[in-house]
Amino acid sequence: MYSSAGLWQAGEAVIGRFLRGLLLVLLIVAVLVAFFPASWAWRLARDHAPQLQVGALHGSVWNGRAEDVVYAGMPLGEVDWTLSRLAVFGHLRLDARVDGPLLRGDGRLQRRGDVLIGRDLHAVVHAQRLPITVGSPGLQPMGDVEIDIARLHVRDRWPQQLDGTVSWQAALADAQGPVSLGRLHARLHEQAGTTLIATLGDDGGPLALSGQAQVSLLGWRLDARLQARDGATRVRQVLSHLGPLQQDGTLIVRRQSGALMGAAR
């Protein structure tokens, strides 16, 4: 028979081995959490993101870089990120930077409950690389469009709070040669958490612009007035491609879709 001292020593040995094993497991888990490769994470997640394509991956989940990123057919180029380790406990805090052929930008994202919060979001979109033409015979926008969002709160995939600006720097339209439109801008905000509003304007350049655009889950509305300032002939020619002009050369744009209240008729 075993003495009580022998049983105690055997129990201590078993407990000691268990604690050492547990410590080793925790150490391995800690190392994996601290240095979990981004490529491993992508193998686990890519089946849940069919619209996202990623080339080479470098670094860890917490601090990494992805190359040749394409989302829904849009080339994003290189994406760098820093993710807070508090994400393990459900607290998302992400700093990201995008540098690609279509746009470059950076910003901060975090999640509080069911709200995704964006702060200091900045992007520059190269308008001439956008796969769009406007009017007939097809004007190609040129120049850089700068987007600055100071605050953005998204719940259920819809912005509940928005504060930002869009600025089309040195706006150009390619109509048998570049035509300068000056600097155009829009002030962005939300109304009652249900409607997004963009107030349109200009900085006194060749194109005079005023108006407002509204977007909600019910539809969208655009009311705008455009006019060549100081009789700029080429700007007036550009406007004539977009629609019929008034006698004073003003182009009045009224568009809507859906059932947005107060939409232009």
Image (cartoon, grey):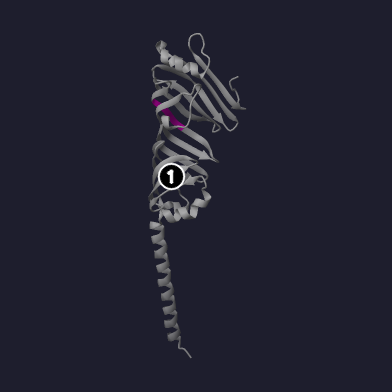
Q: Nearer the viewer, residue 256 or 172?
A: 172
167 part of magenta stretch: yes
Instruction: Tell me if residue 195 can be seen.
Output: yes
Tell me the magenta residue range: 163-169
Where 235 sits versus 28, above or below?
above
Q: In the image as oriented, which residue stretches furthest toward the right? A: 259
Determine which quarter of the picture holds residue 234: top left
| Amino acid type assigned to the residue bearing label 1 in the image | Val
Residue 24 in percent (x, y) is at: 40, 68
**In the rendered view, does 259 fall on the left or right side of 245?**
right
Could you tell me which residue is drawn at 43 percent across and 29 percent down? Answer: 165
Which residue is drawn at the image coordinates 50% and 19% (left, top)? 242
Farthest residue toward the bottom? 1
* Residue 5 percent coordinates (x, y): 43, 85
**Residue 225 appears in the figure:** no
Task: Please report the residue visible at 47 percent of the width from the left and 45 percent of the height from the top.
Answer: 111
Which percent across, then down, holds residue 49? 51, 48
Front residue (pair 161, 79): 79
Above or below, 48 against 244 in this view is below
- Left or right: residue 127 versus residue 218 is left
134 is higher (above) or lower (below) than 78: above
- How many residues crowd mark 1 within 10 Å: few (<14), some (14–19), many (20+)? many
Q: Is residue 71 above or below residue 222?
A: below
Label 1, on which residue?
A: 69
For the C terminus, give its image quadrant: top right
The single residue placed furthest to the top in the displayed view is: 247
